[in-house]
């Protein structure tokens, strides 16, 4: 691991200036360019990615270019949304309204769902666990986890659909 990290640091020192120039040219923003290049190297370290030495430069330039293109696409979408839906026209629910909705949801989950369905639902949405983790924790199959989540979501949907009518 330390060898890979040292190799990535060497790639950073060797290619940073040119990668940043590429990102800055594509984004027309030096700070954004710097962030993109740093993100590429951070992801390499986090994902434990080490390209082959003969392909490292191509990998880095392609990664930076792709991240820049993703960034540009996200900006364009944001701009279109802002044009179509100006912030002044948006009614933002009050925090108390959101709290009330969450409270209603939580009350329904606690009182109307079966114990197993409630456990699965809370592990998935409160604890953000994966199906596999939930199955292991509760000693059930992933299919059972899926079934309980499906039941919970169906019941929630029906309950809140009735409330809206």
Image: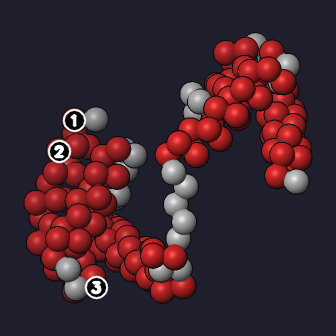
Alpha carbon separation for disc pair 1 and 3: 33 Å
> Which residue position is annotated with label 2?
6
Image disc number at residue 131: none
Q: Which residue is drawn at 83% across and 24% down?
A: 113
Q: Nearer the viewer, mark 3 or mark 2?
A: 3
Compare marks 3 and 2 and give the one earlier in the sequence. 2
Question: Could you tell me which secondary element the residue under label 1 belongs to?
Answer: helix
Alpha carbon separation for disc pair 2 and 1: 6 Å
Image disc number at residue 26: 3
Question: Could you tell me which secondary element the residue under label 3 belongs to?
Answer: helix
Colour treatment of the image: secondary structure
Residue 106: image x %, image y %? 68, 29
Query: In this view of the protein, which residue sits in the foreground, 76 or 63?
Result: 76
Left or right relative to 105: residue 69: left
Left or right relative to 39: residue 121: right
Question: Could you tell me which secondary element the residue under label 2 belongs to?
Answer: helix
> Which residue position is annotated with label 1?
2
Total marks in image? 3
Alpha carbon separation for disc pair 3 and 2: 29 Å
């Amino acid at each position: 691991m330390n060898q890979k990290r040292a190799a990535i640091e060497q790639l950073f020192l060797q290619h940073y200036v040119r990668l940043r120039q590429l990102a800055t040219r594509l984004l027309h923003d030096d700070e954004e360019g710097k962030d993109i290049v740093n993100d590429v190297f951070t992801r390499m370290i986090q994902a434990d990615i080490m390209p082959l030495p003969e392909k490292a430069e191509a990998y880095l330039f392609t990664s930076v270019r792709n991240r820049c293109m993703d960034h540009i696409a996200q900006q364009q979408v944001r701009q279109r949304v802002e044009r179509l839906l100006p912030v002044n026209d948006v009614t933002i629910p009050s925090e108390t309204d959101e709290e009330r909705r969450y409270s209603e949801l939580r009350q329904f989950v606690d009182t109307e769902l079966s114990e197993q369905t409630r456990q699965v639902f809370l592990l998935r949405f409160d604890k953000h666990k994966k199906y596999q983790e939930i199955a292991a924790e509760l000693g059930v199959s992933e299919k059972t986890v899926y079934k309980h989540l499906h039941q919970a979501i169906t019941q929630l949907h029906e309950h809140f659909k009735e409330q809206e009518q």
